[in-house]
Amino acid sequence: MGKRVNLAALAIDDEVAPARRPRGETVAGIASQESAPSVPIHTVTLNPLNKRPSGDDDQIAEMAETIRVHGVIQPLVVCSATAYLAEFPDQRDAVVPADWVVLIGNRRLRASRLAGIQDVTILVNDERAVSMYEVMLVENGQRRELPPIREAEAMSEVLAKSSVSQRELARRIGKSAMYVTQRLALLKLIPELKLAFEAGGLTIERAREVGELPVPLQLTIVAAGKPYRRPVNAGETSSGAALRSIRVSTPAVAAESIRKKFSQAELAELIQLLSEHLAASQASTSTS
């Protein structure tokens, strides 16, 4: 079995390659690149369960050019295919015939393939195949962010596969317990509202709020269309707060009253809705 490593310490930014260290030097107990084995790149595969979107990354080409010049300075953190398939046997078709599966460094592997290099250095940690989703969340906290729903899916996987509580998971990944709770609420959205959220039609605050509502009420919200608000009861706004009035004696007074009565998130949504309405009105006028 390969050398055990501190994964949290390795979870640093992929985009900037660190300066090469002298042979044998270590950082936070991690062996330097020179002590890591080099393997043929075709023996290493991307993690098929990686939560980071697999679409085109505008920085992959830039990373590939850097790799062509300097090589892969930071080793990939991997587990053996055997250890991976012991934990995720349904992924056999995606992994076989590779020998290694990436835990940290999927983007570096993609860039290395694009760069056309033949070998990559690896650090092996089979024990972390079991806690793979937790590794993703730790990595996410110190690097480029996952989309919120992907992050929530990873959290859900950790909770399903281990005995940790939401509070303990939050501690491990450096977030608050409320952060974890709010992210998990996104998974309660019905498919139509998940798509709306991912397309930018719902703010994350509104998505978390709506995700806690019963499915029939979510269906009602979808049927009503944008801005996907909870149906309004008498005397309330769609968020459940008391109705707010503003002063409109002059434009300046109205603007100041609005700023005092509404949060920044509410103001941003109001501006978006007014902009959409204005654009629709102008389009209607130009075609009539």
Image: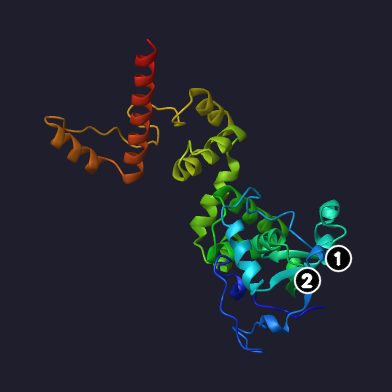
Q: Is residue 281 visible?
A: yes
User: Could you tell me if residue 169 is visible in this image?
Assistant: no
x, y percent for residue 14: 58, 66
Mark toward the start of the polypeptide (2 vs 1): 1
Question: Looking at the image, is 160 positioned above or below residue 43?
Answer: above
Instruction: Tell me: 119 left or right of 8.
Output: right
Residue 4 figure quarter: bottom right
Relative image position of residue 20 (x, y in whole percent):
60, 81
**Mark 2 highlights which residue?**
126
Q: Is residue 113 left or right of residue 176?
A: right
Local SS, label 2? helix
For label 1, the residue is: 82
Q: Tell me how far mark 2 sits from mark 1, CA to CA.
A: 9 Å
x%, y% of residue 73?
64, 75
Q: Residues within 10 Å of mark 1 (few under 14, many from 20)?
A: some
- How many other residues sit within 10 Å of disc 2, few (<14), some (14-19) or many (≥20)? many
